[in-house]
Amino acid sequence: MKFLFVIGALLLLENSALAVRPMPSIKTHPSQHSTFTYDLGMATGSDNGNSYSEINIALNWYLTDWLNWRNAVFTRFGSNITSVSGLDSAFLATYESSTDDKSFGVRAFAGPGVRFATANNSAATAEAGVIFKLAGIQIGGGARYLSYFGSREDVAKTVLPKNETQYFIVLAGGGSF
């Protein structure tokens, strides 16, 4: 009898104005997201006290709303370092949230990858970051960890560390097609 009373009270509560309603969900990565986007980026780091810069241009292929396959051609340059160029390829899990008109939003990403590079600079990578969007401008940053497959040397033949962390910024208008 008690059991029927509880069920009846729950059914009454469900139909009343006092019923607890679920909170509206936050709009996340829109289902109409462009399949392909591109962006420009810049990173900086140091090897044995010698600073360097990297620039890249990337093509992002959104395989799903939350998975991006990012491929970026890059070049690394600086003083007292060996110039390096190549391709970074990574699978990045992404989370996006934006206003309905997409004029303001935030995107967070993280994932593993691999660097194919000249001068014995190929490496396994892991990266993460956050990008803020305001109108058509995107500003963000993050970090990329590299674990090199082989031993490397600078121009003075000094052995470089096996692992390093780069910090990067993204200042872009970006684009899609």
Image (cartoon, grey):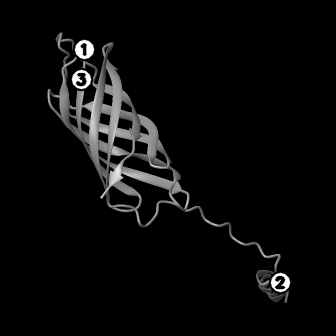
Residue 80 horizontal/vertical position (percent): 23, 13
Label 3–label 2 contact, CB within 8 A: no
Please state which amino acid type lies under the numbered disc 1. Answer: Ser
Q: Is residue 40 above or below residue 60?
A: above
Give the residue number, with chain letter if any, for mark 2. 9
Q: Is residue 7 left or right of residue 107?
A: right
Q: Is residue 153 above or below residue 130?
A: above
Please state which amino acid type lies under the numbered disc 3. Answer: Phe
Give the residue number, with chain letter if any, for mark 1. 79
Q: Is residue 104 above or below residue 65?
A: above
Q: CA distance from mark 3 to mark 2?
A: 72 Å
Residue 150 seen anywhere in this rendered image of the structure: no
Say which of marks 2 and 1 sits in front: 1
Label 1–label 3 contact, CB within 8 A: no
Snapshot quadrant of residue 65: bottom left
* Residue drawn at point x = 79 percent, y = 82 percent: 10
Residue 98 horizontal/vertical position (percent): 53, 56
